[in-house]
Amino acid sequence: MSNNAICCPHCQGQNVQLLSVIHAAGTTRIQATHQTNSSYGPVTIETTGRHQTDLAASVGPPPGKRLLGPVIMTGVGIIILYDGLKLINTYWGVDWTRFFIGATLATIGVIGFVRHWKFNVAQYDKLEEWRRTWLCHACATRFQP
Ligand SMILES: [Zn+2]
């Protein structure tokens, strides 16, 4: 056994791999083209997807939250809010229904964004740890050398 080889601390086996490597190796993109006959003539259906082995799925990175949803919500809220402020022939020139709907959406959007952001910052440490973690294929021990 060479000195610089990484081996399992549990069974001393050398059949070990980084979680990120297992994850990447077990995840493949699928693209399938399928031709079928409809009443309008031949139609080509293209299917794209992701295939993952059970092992690759079990060693996936810690999940982060998407920031796009809250951003869109804030944007839509601001548009409705702006739209409500444009009307001149109502009380104080403001459509209060739109004003409140817009303000509520924008507020929920901003709060959601901050929450997701904080969650992702907290996940970052776990992600760094995941990048350093190895898995032993013989006894399934996870370890950091
Ligand atoms: Zn082992």
Image (cartoon, helix red, strand yellow):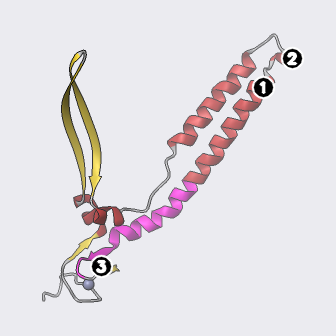
Q: Quadrant of residue 9?
A: bottom left
Q: Which is more toward the observer, 41 or 138?
A: 41
Mark 3 or mark 2, whichever is nearer to me: 3
Answer above or below: position of 78 versus 59.
Answer: above
Q: Secondary structure at mark 2?
A: helix
Q: Which is more toward the observer, 107 or 59?
A: 59
Magenta region, mostly helix, strand or loop? helix
The CA distance from mark 3 to mark 1 is: 58 Å
Mark 3 or mark 1, whichever is nearer to me: 3
Mark 1 or mark 2, whichever is nearer to me: 1
The CA distance from mark 3 to mark 2 is: 69 Å
Answer above or below: position of 121 versus 37.
Answer: below
Q: Is residue 80 left or right of residue 96?
A: left
Q: Residue at x 56, y 52 (%)?
A: 116
Answer above or below: position of 139 versus 68.
Answer: below
Q: Position of residue 138 (x, y in %)?
A: 23, 81
Which residue corresponds to mark 3? 140
